Image (cartoon, rainbow, N blue to C red):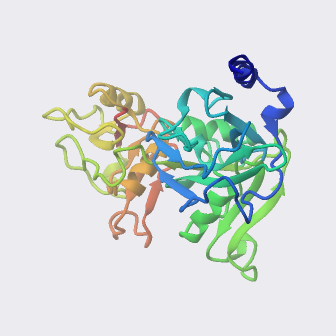
């Protein structure tokens, strides 16, 4: 008997054929009646990037010769990717999530999945499936990261990205291509953008709040307008990127500024005159910023000097996604344009005012991509973990 149990356990640890590692989702994600699995009280688990999250899956009884299989539906291609399989005694991990997942196993009926150091790519729908011969059943849960969607285009203008370039550009700015659900939620929260952009599943859309002639005409109703699926190699658009707060930084006010020289608000004539040298603060800027925070260094710096100013204090020049995250989750509000890692100059406004661009809504304003030799702006720095 012990030999049979050992053989069945060893069989579990043998990798299944490739066709069972990647499967199309089949059947209903949540049966109307569950015999062995407990229906979770909440089907959505909210978390932050960098945190540890647990997706609940608890059995009410243990059938004979059962297995529990966890999988994730990938939004880019809708394939179901197996994460872990267990028979209660042994388990085996699969795929890219393998190093960061484990079974909670707080008791013999607990098959809950724990994910450590949550990343942007972990968001999505997961399935816990009890495999028990002809009586298979499953529950579906969603891992949700609070985040923000922002449009992105390169320094050489609009509609320059094919799909793969758009995906890479978002990743370089501490973000990823948004899903349709993320873009739709951003539209309900006020995102209004007339340029079409790629999203994660390879389709192209643009969100419109205020119908107007250059954006499809005044007669069309507001909504997320779509170009549908496009050729990922040949067609070129902008990108819609999604980023999230780092654990520990959400809700924590960012340091307002570093350095001592007063600066004029964006738009003042004196701000457009190049200075001959950069300004060095009279005291070390932001000596104790928290990990995951963005802060501003005052000065009249060119792009190279901006990067060095951040490195001098153990930080890096901030990426676009990091600035958006600080604006959204840490209420960063500055009336000063600052260099970012992609060579653009932007500034975050949470409280709109006349002398800070004059626009009525909060947002991250942009000065575009000025000459990197121009000594007119400060810089936004990011303190990593």
Q: Nearer the viewer, residue 348 or 18?
A: 18
Residue furthest out toward the bottom: 219
Q: Quadrant of residue 176?
A: top right
Name the foreground residue: 333 vs 383: 383
Task: Say whether residue 311 is left or right of residue 85.
Answer: left
Which quadrant of the view contains residue 217?
bottom right
Indicate the position of residue 319 as horizontal and vertical percent values: 47, 39
Estimate the x, y position of residue 253 in percent, counting from the top left. 28, 53
- In the picture as drawn, the residue positioned furthest to the left comes out as 282
Side of 123 where 312 appears, left or right = left
- Locate the C terminus by quadrant: top left
The residue that appears at 72% across and 64% down in the rendered structure is 33
Q: Is residue 158 visible?
A: no
Left or right side of 56 for 81? right
Count of residue discs: 0
In the rendered image, the vertical position of residue 90 relative to residue 46, given as above or below: above
Q: Position of residue 285 (x, y in %)?
A: 21, 36
Residue depicted at x 70% and y 51%: 199
Answer yes or no: is residue 352 visible.
yes
- Rendered-image quadrant of the N terminus: top right
Image quadrant assignment for residue 303: top left
Can you give x and y, in whole percent of width and height, for residue 271 in the image?
33, 50
Residue 14, placed above or below residue 358 = above
- In the image shown, does 65 or 10 lie closer to the viewer? 65
Closer to us: 346 or 113? 113
Which residue appears farthest toward the top when viewing the image?
Answer: 3
């Amino acid at each position: 008997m012990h030999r049979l149990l050992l053989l069945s356990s060893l069989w579990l640890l043998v990798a299944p054929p490739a066709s069972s590692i990647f499967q199309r989702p089949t059947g209903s994600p949540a049966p109307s009646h569950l015999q062995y699995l407990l229906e979770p009280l909440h089907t959505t688990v909210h978390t932050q990037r960098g945190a540890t999250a647990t997706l609940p899956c608890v059995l009410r009884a243990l059938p004979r010769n059962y297995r529990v299989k966890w999988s994730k539906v990938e939004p880019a291609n809708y394939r179901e990717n197996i994460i872990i399989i267990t028979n209660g005694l042994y388990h085996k991990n699969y795929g890219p999530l393998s190093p960061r997942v484990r079974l909670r196993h707080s008791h013999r009926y607990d098959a809950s999945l724990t994910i450590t150091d949550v990343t942007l790519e972990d968001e999505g729908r997961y399935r816990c499936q009890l495999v028990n011969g002809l009586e298979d059943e499953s529950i579906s849960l969603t891992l949700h990261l609070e985040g923000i969607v922002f449009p992105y285009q390169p320094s050489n203008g609009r509609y320059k990205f094919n799909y793969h370039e758009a995906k890479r550009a978002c990743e370089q700015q501490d973000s990823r291509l948004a899903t349709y659900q993320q873009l739709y939620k951003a539209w309900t929260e006020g995102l209004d953008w007339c340029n079409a952009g790629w999203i994660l599943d390879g389709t192209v859309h643009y969100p419109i709040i205020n119908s107007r002639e250059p954006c499809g005409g005044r007669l069309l109703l507001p909504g997320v307008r779509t170009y549908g699926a496009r050729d990922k190699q040949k067609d070129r658009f902008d990108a819609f990127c999604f980023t999230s707060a780092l654990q520990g930084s959400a809700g924590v006010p960012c340091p307002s500024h570093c350095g001592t020289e007063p600066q004029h608000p964006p738009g003042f004539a004196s701000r457009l005159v190049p200075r001959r040298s950069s300004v060095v603060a009279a005291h070390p800027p932001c000596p104790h910023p928290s990990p995951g925070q963005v802060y501003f260094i005052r000065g009249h710096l060119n792009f190279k000097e901006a990067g060095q100013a951040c490195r001098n204090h153990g930080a890096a020049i901030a990426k676009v996604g990091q600035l958006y995250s600080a604006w959204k989750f840490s209420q960063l509000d500055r009336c000063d344009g600052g260099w970012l890692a992609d060579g653009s100059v932007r500034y975050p406004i949470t409280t709109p005012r006349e002398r800070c661009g004059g626009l009525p809504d909060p947002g991250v304003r942009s000065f575009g991509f000025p000459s990197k030799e121009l000594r007119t702006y400060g810089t936004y720095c990011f303190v990593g973990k």
